[in-house]
Image (cartoon, helix red, strand yellow):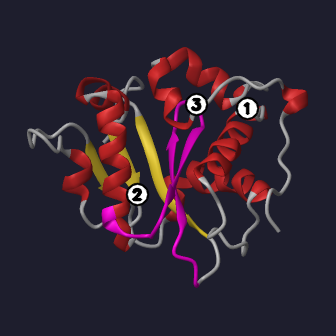
Amino acid sequence: MELPASVNIWEMDTVMGKKEDSKCVLSLLHRKTNLQFYFLLEDCTMLEVQRVFDGIKSFLGPQIFKQVFEIILTDNGFEFHDPISLETDPDTGEKLISVYFCRPRRSDDKGKCEKNHEHFREIIPKGSSMEGLSRNDIRYTSNMVNNYPRKELSYNSPFQLAEQLLPKKVLALNKLHFIPTDKVKLIPIIK
């Protein structure tokens, strides 16, 4: 089924640290702009993902949330096994958005998200522990990744495109702001 170009589609995933870590990072990538939000999870569980989504819904309000996060595509990880809690308004039970799962063994169904994790890993290298990370570390990472210009975006950054297409309140989810290219550093903050 072909969707209209106006539909907002997001790819969702979790980024893990060391195997023994409790903490991990929830990522949400906006396909049109390559903007990727990161949220620190205390545990890689359905309840933590729901907590983040309830916070997003509360911050944005149901109307903006419904308009911006129309469709979310994710894998079948155990932390995403309660899509109804993500789709609905916790106060009214109204369905606001739709969550769909990728086909089994088809990570390319959410390939932009996976590709964008490469930039995340330049700042928080694979195999690093996430236990010492703070929300400020995640916001810093988000600002650096989202202000990094991309060839496929005509050398604009995801932030620059998102600023034109998404409500400003949405960019505040990760406290995103413009950073000049010469100040963008994709270097490790942890070893």
Q: Position of residue 53 (x, y in %)?
A: 34, 47
Measuring from the top left, give residue 8's x and y in whole percent: 40, 31
Can residue 24 be found in the magenta stretch?
A: yes
Q: Nearer the viewer, residue 35 or 55?
A: 55
Estimate the x, y position of residue 187 in percent, counting from the top left. 86, 52
Please determine whether, in this image, residue 133 is positioned above or below residue 143: below
> Label 1 near label 3: C-beta < 8 Å?
no
- Which residue type does callout 2 highlight? Thr
What's the amino acid at mark 1?
Asn
Rounded to the nearest angstrom, the CA distance separating label 2 from label 1 is 24 Å
Badge 3: residue crowd in 10 Å (few <14, some 14–19, many ≥20): many
Q: Residues within 10 Å of mark 2 (few under 14, many from 20)?
A: many
Q: CA distance from mark 3 to mark 1?
A: 12 Å
User: Which of the two marks, 2 or 1, is nearer to us in this view?
Assistant: 1
Residue at 19% x, 54% y is 84
Which residue position holds label 1? Answer: 147
Tell me, for residue 33, which label it has, or none: 3
Q: Residue at x 91, y 29 (%)?
A: 182
Mark 1: give few (<14), some (14-19) or many (20+) Cα within 10 Å: many
Q: Which residues are magenta?
A: 20-47
Q: Secondary structure at mark 2?
A: strand
Circle count: 3
Q: Secondary structure at mark 3?
A: loop
Q: Which residue is mark 2?
A: 74
- Earlier sequence position, callout 2 versus callout 3: 3
Q: Is residue 160 above or below residue 99?
A: above
